[in-house]
Image: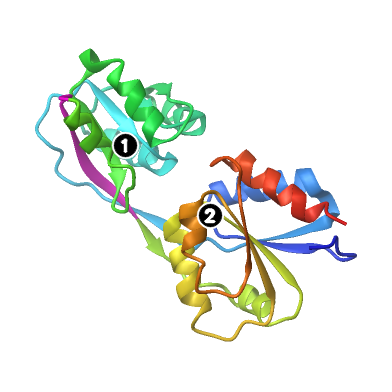
Amino acid sequence: MALQSRALPILITRPAPQGQRFAQALVDRYGLMVETVLCPLMVPAFFSPPLPNGPFGALILTSETACIAAGKLVQAGADLPKLAYCVGDRTARVAKQQGFTAISAQGDASALVDLVLQHPDTGPFLHMRGRDSRGDVVGHLRAAKVAATDVVVYDQQEQPLSDAVWTLLEQAGTLLVPLFSPRTAEILVRQIKERPVSSSLVFVTISAAVADILSDLTCRVEIAAEPTQDGVVNAMDKLIFQT
């Protein structure tokens, strides 16, 4: 993909506020070379479910949204432990903002399981998660004979593509689409297949699992060398700065 004389449109489908932060990071990095188009394909709906029987020694939090959900439950009077094991640094920062004592695994679900297994005496553990959850954190902990249970405290509800995005899709030219989750990819593919698309779609995916979901589309797909936001941006660099 050659560097264009006009700004390259980049479709950002991540939920807010992640999408807003990512858009700003791209503008800071590429300046006038890009035009970010924000269109979250999921928005959170928070629940107040009955909590499993405790007591629990620590929470497990695998997303920013889970941190916010836990904070809302505490504000509503729920008796939750202060200690929280978090999947990454961003999640840990949000957990701290919600009043928890957060420890970051600095990685993915596997790294989080490894971290918790190093501190089994701080359990039992309560994984506060979304309805659509991957990695089976609780299953891995139970397989290691560590007491853990989970509770669904939010759902990410599907949203339609905006009129502005459909206008882009119906025009000739390149549209760059970074994708960070299998579910977002599934939603996007399903909606795109409902109407004709004229733009040349170039996807940058955080993993091969996300890329596999795009197999039915006529498009170019680049997979990040590492499953992180930095990995996605590095893959985008090769496309945007290529001449």
Task: Report x, y in % for residue 173.
Answer: 76, 75
Q: Residues within 10 Å of mark 1 (few under 14, many from 20)?
A: many
Task: Report x, y in % for residue 127.
Answer: 26, 35
Task: Report x, y in % for residue 88.
Answer: 47, 31
At label 1, the amino acid type is Ala
The residue to which callout 1 is attached is 70
Q: Nearer the viewer, residue 2 or 7?
A: 2
By secondary structure, the bulk of the magenta-drawn segment is best described as strand
At label 2, the amino acid type is Arg
**Start-end of magenta stretch:** 145-155
- Which residue corresponds to the image point at 52% horizontal and 59% vertical from the top-left? 211
- Residue 83 seen in this snapshot: no
Extreme residue toward the left, this view: 53
Count of numbered tags: 2
Quadrant where the C terminus is found in the figure? bottom right
Residue 103 versus residue 16 in the image, above or below: above
The residue to which callout 2 is attached is 14
Marks 2 and 1: which is nearer the front? 2
- Which residue corresponds to the image point at 15% horizontal and 25% vertical from the top-left? 145
- Which residue corresponds to the image point at 9% horizontal and 33% vertical from the top-left? 53
Q: Nearer the viewer, residue 167 or 136?
A: 136
Task: Report x, y in % for residue 192.
Answer: 53, 77
